[in-house]
Image (cartoon, helix red, strand yellow):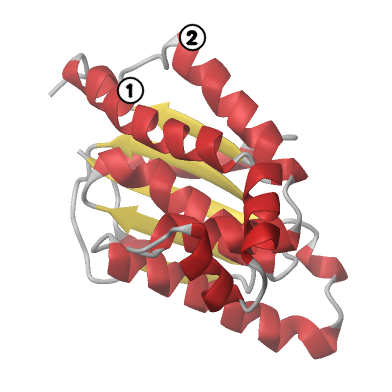
Amino acid sequence: MIAVISGDLIKSQHIPKQQYDSMLYQLDQSLRFVANRYDGQFSVFRGDALQLQLNQPRVIFRAAILVYLQLKSANYKVRQSLAIGHVDNLRADIKTATGAAFTLSGRGLDNMTQQHLILHIEGQTIADGFALTIELIDVLLDKITPKQANALFYYLTLADNNHATLAKELKTSRENVTKLLNLAHYQVIERFLNYSESAIATQLAGAPQ
């Protein structure tokens, strides 16, 4: 079982031409950071579409939320369809790989409407409590401002993430960091990330092998 994230930037067609290269660079850097952090592979295609493969399904929400935050901090919004399933053939170029994980992720993206995050697991119905929690986190992420997203991204990725250290990294005051993180509901997001790992493990325990 592997994890696959398919996504695209929202309203990318409205990005001015002079900003398009900057957008592509930010998208590449966001995916590269997450792929390196979680030993994954990624591909960017059609200019604004992405696919990310992770060999550890339990970290799929950590990866997706870090991508979301890093892009949001640059004032871009992304929607992501998360899927966990089998893979038929692992390839160096993930665009040519096949399997349930890729199929579920792609179909999920095609069917997304207002969501920014959805999850499908091969052969499983997502537990009601887990599904509701994902929807609530989606709402919180949608309301985060770029500055809040940036502060939360650093909080979730720095080994030393106390507010004083973050203030130095972000070149602002400790009080402002605390304010930004509180407005981003950082403790709720962090609790969700921890919860998502155990919830996915529980789901996969009942998945077909």
Residue 112 located left or right of residue 61: right
Q: Is residue 21 above or below residue 88?
A: below
**Image quarter for residue 141?**
top right
**Image quarter for residue 190?**
top left
The N terminus appears in which quarter of the rendering?
Answer: top left
| Kind of residue indicated by mark 2 | Asp
Q: Is residue 35 above or below residue 145?
A: below
Residue 45 located left or right of residue 33: right
| Kind of residue indicated by mark 1 | Ala
Residue 18 located left or right of residue 38: right
Q: Which residue is mark 2?
A: 128
Q: What is the x, y in percent for residue 163?
A: 52, 59
Q: Which residue is mark 1?
A: 199
Q: Residue at x 65, y 43 (%)?
A: 182
Q: Residue at x 68, y 85 (%)?
A: 22
Label 1 Cα neighbours within 10 Å, binned few <14 / some 14-19 / many ≥20: some
Looking at the image, which is closer to me, 201 or 20?
A: 201
How many numbered tags mark residues here? 2
Q: Is residue 6 above or below residue 14?
A: above
Give the distance between the C-alpha atoms of the residues marked 2 and 1, in whole angstroms: 11 Å
**Image quarter for residue 16?**
bottom right
Looking at the image, which is closer to me, 5 or 74?
A: 74
